Amino acid sequence: MTANMGVSIHTATEDDLDALVGLQFRAFGEFDELVAGRNTPENRAIMVKRHIQHMHANPGLVIAKAQLPDGTIAGFCMFYFPNAAASSDLERTPTPLRPLRDNSALSKITVEAPWIDDSERRRKAEVFLRFINQERQEHIAGKGVATFVRYMCVDPKYQRQGFGKALMSWGCERFDEVKSDAYLEASSEGQGLYEKFGFKVIEPHSYGEFEDGIKLNWSHMWRDAKK
């Protein structure tokens, strides 16, 4: 599949992670600063290690990259496809979406961020990640296993040029091939793109306000597998 400027979509490997993480920090700004720290070589190295752990824990994880003819990566997206061998650790490792067996389990969710050295910043990150995890579980209640779409990133200098559309088209073709429902959390900027591919808002925007003043809003979105 090709997009603007001759971009093609390929499956990324561990060798691509340095470039992908750099792009991730540039694309997500204050969100990644909250959960991963400032954009420094040390923090990028920590994020690379985390992504490697996720790849090893999830045989169904496919990372699609949008690549220019000169090898530059313009964007990427992570698709956690259902796989019987995937980690069952819903709190510590992103996985294909599986609802908790009972609602009381929500109160037991504990999320840790041991990769953050500073204790106060780690506490704030853990509060935020726990909030996100609980919100996710509440909004998929009553639904089945689904592909979890995570980290849809396009480098700021390539945004609004069709690369996000190419990545999502690539992913949706595969959802339909394997008959998988899909779930994602959309920013207000990205929601319109996902709606074009059949994603629907499960609930109106959720708002998070945290101690450091960061406010985020997003939509929980679901796409039913095509019959």
Image: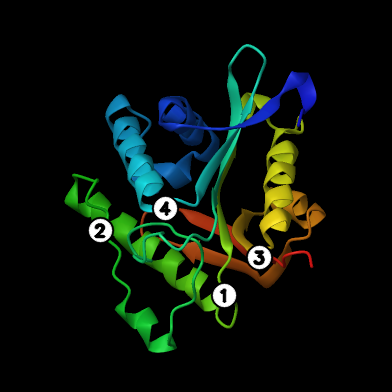
- What's the distance in space between the residues labelled 4 and 1, CA to CA? 22 Å
Quick one: label 1, few (<14), some, or many (20+) residues within 10 Å?
A: some
Q: Mark 2 points at which residue?
A: 123
Residue at which label 1 appears: 139
Residue type indicated by callout 2: Arg
Q: Is residue 83 above or below residue 150?
A: below
Residue type highlighted by circle 1: His
Q: Report the Cα–Cα distance between label 3 and label 2.
A: 34 Å
- Give the mark nearer the N terminus: 4 vs 1: 4
Residue occupying the point 75% across, 19% down = 6
Residue on which the image places disc 3: 181
Tell which of 28 and 153 is nearer to you: 153
Residue type at numbered disc 3: Asp
Q: In this view, does 64 lie to the left or right of 119?
A: right
Mark count: 4
Q: In which quarter of the image is the N terminus?
A: top right
Sooner in the amino-acid sequence: mark 2 or mark 1: 2
| Residue 80 position (above or below residue 64) | below
> Given the image, on which type of amino acid does mark 4 rest?
Asn
- On screen, residue 65 versus residue 21, left or right, reads right
Instruction: Judge depth for marks 4 and 2 and give the one in front.
Output: 4
Q: Is mark 4 on a helix, strand or loop?
A: loop
Which of the two discs, 3 and 2, sits closer to the camera?
Answer: 3
* Mark 4 vs mark 1: in front: 4
Secondary structure of the residue carrying tag 3 is loop
Q: Say few, some or many: other residues with alpha carbon within 10 Å of mark 4 (under 14 / 14 to 19 / 20 or more).
A: many
For the residues marked 1 and 3, what is the alpha-carbon distance in whole angstroms? 14 Å
Q: Mark 4 points at which residue?
A: 58
